Image: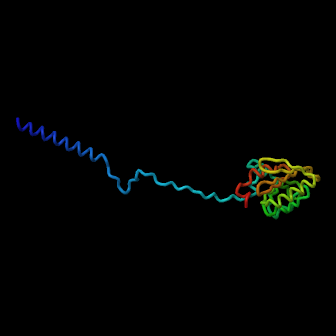
Amino acid sequence: MSSTKVTTGAVALFISVIAIGAGCAAVPEPSPTQPSSDPAPVETNTTEPEPATATCENLIGEATYAAFDADDTLELYTGDEVGGFPSLGGIDTEEFRDGVMCRWGIPNTDAAHDYSWAPIDAARATGFREQLEANGVTATETPEGTLYSGIDEASGATTEILFGDGFWVYAYNGITAVEVAQNAPRASRYH
């Protein structure tokens, strides 16, 4: 009988040691490869994305561009290929050359849809606004800026010039200056 008591006592002691050891083993020590409980600082990118460049493709809405591009009678002319735009209020449209000038036109005709975007400083903008108003062109305020609009006497088409914050746009014959201002890449407006 005494051997049974020793065996039972030894088994009880063995189970107690295992239970205590299991309790200690349940708490692993942090290793160098395990992350600590302290959150790592999150790096934030505070640099702004590269400014987009205004182009004939992105100055008008996708639907407008797709319609012009699908029209086999129209060709896109850019930059120096654009001879000049119809004037509004005596403004020389050559002033838009330091920006982007675009024309969707029928080759060898005067039929065209013109639009442009260019940077402008406050002093030049004021001078052009005064010239437009002196020539009887009225202004309308829009969320995009001050819009001047008139009818081209030769073609009967609407001609518009819009002055925004650091930029101005021109639109003629079916394209609106508001559309161009809304589509111009924001960063490009402030060269």
Q: Nearer the viewer, residue 78 or 106?
A: 78
Q: Looking at the image, which residue is at 40% across and 53% down?
A: 36
Pinpoint residue 42: horizontal percent, then vertical percent. 51, 54
Location of residue 161 in the rendering, given as x and y in whole percent from the top left corner: 84, 53
User: Residue 151: x percent and y percent?
Assistant: 91, 50
Q: Is residue 72 above or below residue 78?
A: above
Q: Is residue 78 left or right of residue 13?
A: right
Q: In the displayed orientation, state which residue is furthest to the left.
A: 1
Figure quadrant of the N terminus = top left
Name which quarter of the figure residue 13 lies in: top left
Q: How is the image coloured?
A: rainbow
Where on the picture, by quarter, is residue 5?
A: top left
Closer to the camera, 110 or 181? 181
Q: Residue extending furthest top?
A: 1
Image quadrant assignment for residue 128: bottom right
Q: Position of residue 114 (x, y in %)?
A: 83, 55
Total labels: the figure holds: 0
Residue, x 27% and y 44% (percent of image)? 23
Q: Is residue 75 left or right of residue 24?
A: right
Quarter of the image with the C terminus is bottom right
